[in-house]
Image (spheres, coloured by chain):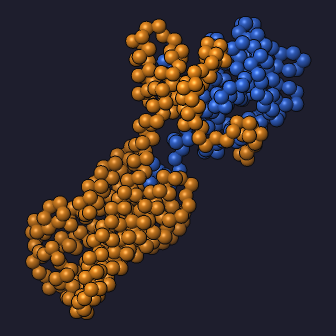
Chain colours: A blue, B orange
């Protein structure tokens, strides 16, 4: 496998634009923007490996009054990406129906919707369905804003000086 | 030192020409470096002064041409620095930022020059002719104008900036201008002593100090203007990111699922040498994390673990600990 770069889709770019992030956003900026779009506060929970099904790296649990993002223990950098992926599901409005669809496709052991609570997971080593692909694409696009695209943000002063 | 300043400025000019053509960078800095290169070319260090001056009459008109070019170059540097570091309104309402003002400055230098009794080309034009009032006024006005322009750049350049590169570039340009101002003051003192017919150790000292002060100022200004293009090139090459991509591929061969060794090699080469290396490094780090979560690489060897940590640090050196960041919210 080569190191395939994910090109941000039109949907990902539009979604990020709608967040109205500052030019050099931080993770707290992004959390605030996602909570605003979501309409509920978010809680984050690092969980041991056995809590999540094999191959699942994180999940978003949509509760009536809040959202919980659980992520597998790992390097902070990788955990951050898992969280961005779950943000992708939230921002793309995947709660409910896409989860049911994916459950019927049999990709996840713990995906579903019950008593008003739905959840979605990020798989590590299985083919990505449409919703997963969209969330992953948005996660990479968000990472580009948070991490790898920082150098590309050039102020007027920097442009004039020739940066 | 003059030759070093010339070649450095020529390289900076070429880099800036590219930046203006490709990335809409400041044309003021391009103009400044271009005019500065021609100005330094006229110093006689690259082609003998007598050869160049002979082309325009052989009576030291080259001295005037060089000084007009240097004045224009410093004015353009000032324009660039002000447009980057001051508010647009501040620039718009100041007469000193209009091209007509530059024209007036050039005229103020030129008029006294034309009133002198001309002598044949000489490498020591000022020491030999400064007793003439016209030459004294010409050279003093030139030095005063240059010193004034340099001082205004110095005042704007030094100070805190959001961008480290802009701060470094502006600071080095400011220090260069500061040295140039000292050179101008030194030269005015020297010319005044000579004009008054005073000889002595102070005259010798001021004569000796001019070149190191003035041209080291020009050299530093050239260097300062060259910092942003150098930083841009460094970022574009992204050698550190490419290095970590190579290291991670070597330490985590499981990220390449291809069976053929030759294909694996070419995929590594494509990754190391490909465009957008920072994004490639990010993707690689995430893929390695996914491998562990998928149980395909349960434990990393200590060197691999260390390489992964360092590669992540390369991407996240400005981040706070994740637990802390997740508890924070920021105004948007």
What residue appears at the point 79 percent right and 18 percent down from the top-left corner? A51
Horizontal relation, residue B277 to residue A10: left or right: left
Residue B264 percent coordinates (x, y):
44, 14
Residue B183 percent coordinates (x, y):
34, 74
Residue B24 percent coordinates (x, y):
42, 48
Residue A95 percent coordinates (x, y):
78, 21
What residue appears at the point 86 percent right and 26 percent down from the top-left corner? A63
Would you place residue B108 above or below residue A118 in this image? below
Horizontal relation, residue B329 to residue A134: left or right: right
Would you place residue B82 above or below residue B249 in this image? below
Choose between B263 and A133: the one closer to the eye: B263
Horizontal relation, residue A79 to residue A154: left or right: right
What residue appears at the point 19 percent right and 81 percent down from the top-left corner? B127
Residue B135 visible in the picture: yes
Residue B191 visible in the picture: no
Would you place residue A29 above or below residue B169 in this image? above
Residue lying at the far right in this picture: please name it: A115
Quarter holding the N terminus of chain B? bottom left
Horizontal relation, residue A131 to residue B98: left or right: right
Would you place residue B110 above or below residue A96 in this image? below
Q: Quadrant of residue B209?
A: bottom left
Quarter holding the C terminus of chain B? top right
Choose between B296 and B184: the one closer to the eye: B296
What residue appears at the point 64 percent right and 41 percent down from the top-left corner? B319
Total marks drawn? 0
């Amino acid at each position: 496998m080569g190191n395939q770069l994910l090109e941000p889709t039109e949907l990902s770019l539009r979604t990020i634009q709608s967040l109205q992030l500052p030019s050099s956003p931080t993770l707290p900026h992004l959390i605030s923007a996602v909570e605003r779009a979501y309409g509920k506060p978010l809680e984050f929970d690092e969980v041991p490996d056995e809590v999540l099904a094999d191959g699942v790296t994180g999940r978003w649990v949509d509760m009536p009054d809040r959202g919980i993002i659980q992520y597998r223990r790992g390097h902070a950098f990788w955990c951050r990406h898992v969280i961005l992926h779950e943000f992708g599901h939230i921002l793309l409005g995947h709660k409910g129906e896409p989860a049911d669809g994916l459950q019927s496709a049999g990709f996840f052991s713990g995906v579903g919707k019950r008593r008003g609570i739905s959840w979605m997971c990020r798989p590590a080593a299985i083919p990505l369905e449409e919703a997963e692909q969209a969330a992953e694409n948005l996660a990479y696009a968000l990472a580009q804003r948070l991490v790898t695209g920082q150098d590309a943000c050039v102020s007027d002063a920097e442009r004039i000086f020739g940066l | 030192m003059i030759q070093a300043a010339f070649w450095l400025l020529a390289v900076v000019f070429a880099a800036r020409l590219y930046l203006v053509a490709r990335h809409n960078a400041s044309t003021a800095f391009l103009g400044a470096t271009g005019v500065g290169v021609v100005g330094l070319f006229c110093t006689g260090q690259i082609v003998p002064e007598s050869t160049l001056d002979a082309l325009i009459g052989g009576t030291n008109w080259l001295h005037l041409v060089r000084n007009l070019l240097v004045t224009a170059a410093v004015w353009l540097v000032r324009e660039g620095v002000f447009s980057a570091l001051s508010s647009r309104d501040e620039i718009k309402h100041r007469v000193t930022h209009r091209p007509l003002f530059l024209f007036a400055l050039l005229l103020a230098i030129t008029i006294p020059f034309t009133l002198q009794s001309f002598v044949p080309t000489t490498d020591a034009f000022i020491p030999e002719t400064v007793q003439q009032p016209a030459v004294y006024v010409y050279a003093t006005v030139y030095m005063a104008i240059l010193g004034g322009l340099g001082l205004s750049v110095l005042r704007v350049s030094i100070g805190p900036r959001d961008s480290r590169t802009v701060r470094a570039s502006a600071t080095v340009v400011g220090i260069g201008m500061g040295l140039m101002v000292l050179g101008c003051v030194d030269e005015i003192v020297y010319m005044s002593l000579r004009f008054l017919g005073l000889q002595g150790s102070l005259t010798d000292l001021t004569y000796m100090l001019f070149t190191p002060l003035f041209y080291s100022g020009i050299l530093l200004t050239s260097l300062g203007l060259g910092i942003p293009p150098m930083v841009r090139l460094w970022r574009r090459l992204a050698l550190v990111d490419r290095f970590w991509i190579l290291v991670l591929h070597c330490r985590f061969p499981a990220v390449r699922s291809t069976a053929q060794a030759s294909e694996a090699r070419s995929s590594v080469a494509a990754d190391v040498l490909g465009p957008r290396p920072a994004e490639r490094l990010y993707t690689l780090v995430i893929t390695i994390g996914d491998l562990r979560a998928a149980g395909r690489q349960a434990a990393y060897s200590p060197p691999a673990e260390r390489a992964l940590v360092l590669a992540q640090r390369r991407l996240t050196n400005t981040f706070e600990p994740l637990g802390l960041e997740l508890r924070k919210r920021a105004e948007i």
